Each structure stands twice: as structure tokens, then as C-alpha cells.
Image: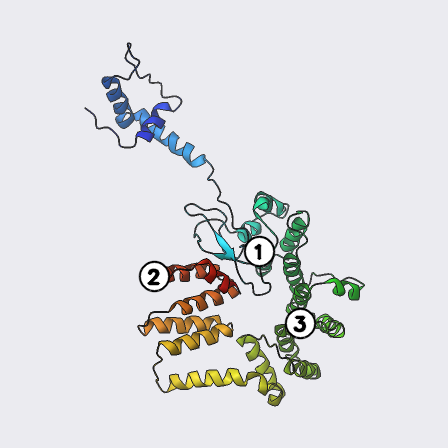
Amino acid sequence: MFPVMNDQGLNTRLLEEKGVGVEIPRNEQDGSFTSDSRAESVKFAVVSEESESLRANARRKTSKEPQRPKLPPDMDYSFKRVLYEEDEEISQKPTIDTFTDNDEGFASEASSDGIDQELELEGLSVEENVSKVLSKWSPFLRKGSLSLTNRELGYLGLPERALETFCWVKKQPHLFPDDHILASTAEVLGGSNELKMPFDLDKFTGLASRSVYEAMLRGHIKGGRLKLALKLLSMAKESNRVLDTGVYAKLILELGKDPDKSTLVLVLLEELAVRDDLNLTPQDCTAIMKICIRLGRFEIVEGLYDWFREALAMLWGMEASNCLLDLPAYRVVIKFFVALNDLSRAVRYFSKLKEAGFSPTFDIYCSLIKVYMASGRLAKCKDICKEAEMAGFRFDEQTMLKLQQ
């Protein structure tokens, strides 16, 4: 008696495959398979040469079957984001965006296998339009979904694809009008010097929202069109627009590279010094300090960085004296860097906390998730959530809402 194969599905597929050429006899009285015929069929499936070719045909047939794409996330199209999933569904909740409030998504589950949308768009030939990739996902998208995708296309050096994406979005009634995609497109095109400014600039800028206006400024600064950036900044001041202080910092850094622009730099520094709502990253602070050192005008920005310098000086003094931090000290330090949006230092001290043998508390996990969210590192958010859950913490809906603020 031949051993019966465990994979009955394979038996059935082999025996039902066209071209088998084997009729399995049945009992003439009740139509059931006889034991001998079953044994012969198993023998045929296991040891015959023809069964080997049938197995190969079955494997080829299976490999040709298209894999069912899972539903893509409705908000997250960040770089390295998967569009096709093998094992896990993706579910996510809205969270903070560096430039907008509701643009990105929080991935509670993520995957590591699949095709990146940006790389799929990058792989299109010159003759092909982005609609070939985007149309199949149109039912699953909503306003703001493709803004980060456009920025990533800019990083990849594909401003024309970003413009095509924006033109495609304009034709989708459920996706447009949308300031998020408009702002990201303006920034990408401005950074590549391909943003055409209208003749009636006053009328155009008067209709632009703050996010779009700042995106145009960032794009022109990145593209080196500083004269136009200064004009936009002047128009914003005349119309009493309040722009983000980070835009000032970026413009100061670029203007400071030219010694002939020192007068303009000093004017911008004075405007920045009177602002109460400073939203400067540590990189912005460092950039402005470099310019001030070059100009020898330390007193202008001294008041801006006292709090920053004092806090870091205390921390560095403790480290220099080999003072061991306890858990409450680590909590304060990590929250301090999260407040500064300094991801690298926050992560470094989070690692030091664990190396010192401490177990992170729930609020430390929340702080790390928040700073990763602000940086768009959604995969890291997922890793921190999993680590927290393994430590026995659970993120309820109320906690997630707090993290989004």
C-alpha cells in the first residue's frame, strides 16, 4: 500500500488538472470511489513521472495568480510605505504633521514587504503618467493623502511627477480642493526652480493659505531664489500675515552665506527677536548662532537661547561630572528634547535609560511616540507601541487622542 499524501489539496489539484488522462473508477452500485482506485490514484500522484510534470504545472498556475492587494492606508503615503501586503492588514489613526494638523497617519500595524508608492512612481517610464499607479487607489484616498508622497518625490528629484500627481488630484472631486497637496507641490516645484509665479503676485498670495504661503517660501529658499523669498516675506508683513519662525531661520541661514547680505540678515534677526511664539528646532538655533558668530552680533539673539543653553549646559555638566541620572531625571531630559523636537537626542537618552537598567514609564513611551509622529517616522511609532505593549502598557483611544494633539 502506498503512503497517502498529507496534502489532500495537492492530490485534488493534481488529479483535476487538465491533461491528467486518468479516470478514477467508481463503484457501479453507489458511485463511490473504490479503495483500490484510491490507492492507484495516490500511487499515480506520488510516484509517476507524469505527476511530476503536473506538480510543476500546478506550481506555475499558482504563481500566476495575482496576489490580492490589501486596502492601502487612507492617510499614510510616507517614504518606504508598503502598498501591497502579504500577511497583515493596515489600520491607522490620524496624528500630527510637521506642517499640518491632520495630514499624516498613525500606523498601529505596519508591514515590511511590498512596493513603495514613491518608488513605483519613480519606476514609470517617461511616456507613462502617474494615473497608471494612482487610479487604482483612488477609492481609498482622501484629502491630504498624497501630500507627503509629493514631498518624497521631491527628495527623489522628480518634481515633474509631483506636478503630475497634483494635476491628477485636481481631477478627483473627493480629493480636491486640498491645501495640503497644494502646499507640498509648491514646495517641491519651488525647490527645483520650476514654480512659475503669476504676474499679479499680490492677488495670488492674498488667496493663498498660510501653509501654502510658507511652502512657497521654503521652496524658493531651497531653490536659491532668495530675492523672490524676500519679496514674499515683505508682502506677508505688509498684509499682517504671521509666518512660522522656522521660515525666518532658513532664510537667515541662506542670506548669511553672502557677506553683502548682512544688513538684510540683521533686519530679519531683529524681527525674529521680538516674536513670542518661537518655534525653532535645534537645527534652526544652530544655524542662527553660526550667522551671529560670523556677524559678531551675539546680543541680538542672546535672549532667544538662554533657556536652551541653560538646560543643555546643566545636562552636559552632569554628564561631565559622571553624575548618574535616575529615572525621574531621564523622564525630564527626554521630555525636554521632545519639546525641542530634537529626535536624535530624545532617542539617544531613551537608549541610555534602558542601558542604565531602567524600565521606561508609560509617559516616556508616549513622548517617544509623539516625537516620532512629528518626524513622520510611523514605522518607529509602531515599534515603540509594540515595545510598550510587551512591557504591559495599553494605548486606549483617549491616550491616542492626546498623542495627536
The secondary structure type at the circle numbered 2 is: loop
Left or right position of 143 against 367: right
| Label 2 packing within 10 angstroms: few (<14), some (14-19), many (20+) | few
* Amino acid under disc 2: Gly
Q: Amino acid at mark 1?
A: Thr
Q: Secondary structure at mark 1?
A: helix
Q: Report the residue marked by disc 2.
A: 392
Side (left or right) of 90 relative to 15: right
Q: In the rendering, which numbered label is found on residue 149?
A: 1
Q: Is residue 353 left or right of residue 252?
A: left
Residue contact at pointers 2 and 1, CB within 8 angstroms: no
Residue extending farthest left: 1
Image position, residue 253 (x, y; %): 62, 77
Which of 287/235 is in front?
235
Work out whether mark 1 precedes mark 3 in sequence or the reverse, and give the earlier one.
1
Q: Look at mark 3 in the image and give the residue it sits on.
A: 243
* Amino acid identity at mark 3: Leu
Q: Residues within 10 Å of mark 3 (few under 14, many from 20)?
A: some
The percent coordinates of residue 369 (x first, y second) are: 45, 65
Considering only order in the chain, which callout, 1 or 2, is on the residue closer to the N terminus?
Answer: 1
Q: Position of residue 149 (x, y in %)?
A: 57, 56
Between the residue at mark 1 and the residue at mark 3, the CA separation in whole angstroms equals 24 Å
Query: Which sits earlier in the primary sequence, circle 3 or circle 2?
Result: 3
Q: Which residue lies most toward the top here?
A: 29
When asked about the image quadrant of residue 11, the answer is top left
The mark lying in front, picked from 2 and 1, is 2
Is 257 rendered above or below residue 374? below
What is the basis of the colouring in this image? rainbow
Closer to viewer: mark 1 or mark 3: 3
